Image (cartoon, rainbow, N blue to C red):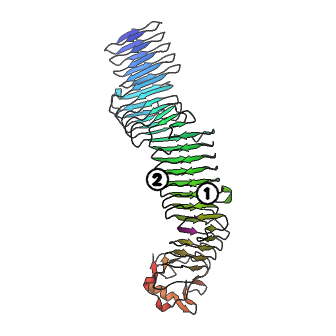
Amino acid sequence: MTKIVGTEGDDILAGTSQNDSILGLGGNDHIDGGAGNDSIYGGTGDDILTSSSGYDRLDGGEGNDRLELVGVGGAVTGGAGVDTLSINLSRLSAPVIFNGQQRHAIIGNGAASEQQIYFSDIEKLELTTGRGNDHITGLAGDDYIHAGDGYDTIIDTSGANRLFGGANNDSIFTTLSSAEIDGGSGDADLLYLSDSWRTEDVTVDFAQGTASTGVIIRGFENVNVELGSGNDTIIATNVSSSTLRGGEGNNHMEGSRGQDYMISGSGNDVMIGGDGYDIITSVGGTDLLIGGNGNDTIHDASLNATDGFTTIDAGAGDDLIQIYFPEGSIDGGDGIDTLAMYFQGITAPINFDAAAGIVDTTLTFSDVEIFKVESGSGNDTLRGGAYGDFLAGNVGDDFITGGAGNDELWGGTGADTMAGGDGADTFRYWSDTYFGTGIDHIEDFDVNSGDVLRIIGPATSTTRIHDFDSFMAASTQTPEGVYVAFNGSATYGILLENTTLSSFTANDLVFT
C-alpha cells in the first residue's frame, strides 16, 4: 500500500494504481484516490475528496468538505463541519436504491463492494443517477437530486431541495419548502406535496409554476397536494389530474383538465372541478362546490346544521350529488343528474317534493332529474319526479309517491302509504319477519301492467312468502283490495288497494 501525505497548505494529491493511504493534513486540499481501494483523509480545512475507481473510504475530517463518488460505491464520513456528499452514477444503467435516512445505497443488486455506499455525518446531498428505475430518499438538509432516465421515485420532505425526475414517468414526494421541483420529460409525472403542518397562508399555482413559498414547479402532469391550516389557494388547471386536500382554513381549489379528487377542510372553501370526471367532497364549513363539465360525483358530508351551508353547482355532464343533511342549495346543471339524499340520522319529519325543488324549507334544488332518497325516523312525505326514482321511508309512518317514471319505493317500518304514479313501479319488501308494524297501503298497484312487488330474502323465511304460491296463500281479497298478511297477522302486512286477487300472476312478483 502506498502512503501519501500532504502538507499544512492547500495540496493537490493523486493516488496511484495501487491501494493507497492518503492524508491531506491542513489546508483546503483536493485529493483523488485514482485506481485501487484507497483510504483518504482530508484533515483540517475545506477539502475535496474524489473516488472514481475501486471501493474507497473517504473521511473529510474537520471543515466543510466535499466528498465525491463517481460511478462507484464507497464508505464516506463527513466529519465535523457542513459536508456535501456528491454521487454521480449517470453513466450506469443499473437501478439505484438510495436511503438517506439509513445512510446507505445499493447500486444494481449490491453483490459487489463497489455496488454499496455507506455514509455518515453528511449534511448536504448531490445525487445523479442513470438509466435505471431508482428509488431515492433524501437527507434532512438541502439536497440536489437528479434521477436520470428511468421510472424513478424521489422522497425528500426536508430542506430547500432541488429535485429533478429526468426522462420517463417519475414520482416526487416533497414539500413546498423545496427550492425547485421538476418532473422531467415524461408524460405522466406525479408530484405529491405534503404540507399539512403549515399554518401560514399558501398559494400554489401549477399553471404559473410557482408557489408563495418561493419554490419553482414544472414538468408534472399529475399532482397531489395536502395543505395546512392557513387560507390556501391551489390552482391546478394546467395538469392532467389532481388530488387536492384543504386544511382548516378558508381555501380556494381549482382542479385539472382531467380527473380530480378534491376534499375540503373545516373552513369555508371554494372547490372548482375541471373538464374531467371529478369527485368533490365537502366535510364542513360554508362551501361552494362547482363540478365543471364532466360526469362528476359531489358529496356534501355535513351531518347537521352546525356543519355549514353548502352551495353546489354540478355543471354540465351527468352528475351524482350526495348529501346527508337537508340544508343547502343545489343546481344540477346540464345533463341527467342524480341527487342522492341519505337522512337516516334525522328524527324530524322530512318533506321532499321533486317538482317543487325543496326538502323542507332548508334545502333547494333545480335541474335535477333522478332522485334517491332514504329518509329518517320521522313520519315523512316523499314525492318523486319525472324520472325513475328510489324513495325509501325507513322508520315512521310515511307517505311516498313516485310520480312519473319507473320508480322503486320502500316504506320501511311503520304503516306507510305508497303510490307509484305513472310508469312500471317496484314496491320493495323483505321476506323475513322484519317488516316493522302496521299495514302498508299501496294505492295504485297496477296488476299485469309492469308494477311489481319485489320480495327480498331467503326462501326459508318464516313469512313463507318466497314464491307465487306462498304469496297467494298469504293473501286475502277484501272490499278495499288484496291484503297480504305477514306471519298470518291481520294488523301486519300490505293492502294493495283496488286490486283483485284473481288478477295476480307470477309476473307481478319478483323474488331476489
As for residue 380 lying within the magenta part, the answer is no
Q: Say if 217 sits above or below 287 in the image.
A: above
From where the camera sits, is residue 300 visible? Answer: no
> Which of the pair 101/235 is nearer the observer?
235
Q: Residue at x 54, y 68 (%)?
A: 371
Where disc 1 sits, the SS reads strand
Mark 2: give few (<14), some (14-19) or many (20+) Cα within 10 Å. many
Provide residue 368's location: percent of width, then percent of height.
54, 65
Q: Is residue 472 left or right of residue 130?
A: right
Left or right: 203 in relation to 124: right
Going from N to C along the chain, the mark reached first, 2 or 1, is 2
192 vs 488: above or below: above
The region drawn magenta spans: 366-375
Please tell me in which quadrant of the rendered image residue 98 appears. top left
According to the picture, the residue beneath numbered tag 1 turns out to be: 311
Task: Identify the disc placed on residue 276.
Answer: 2
Circle on res. 336: none
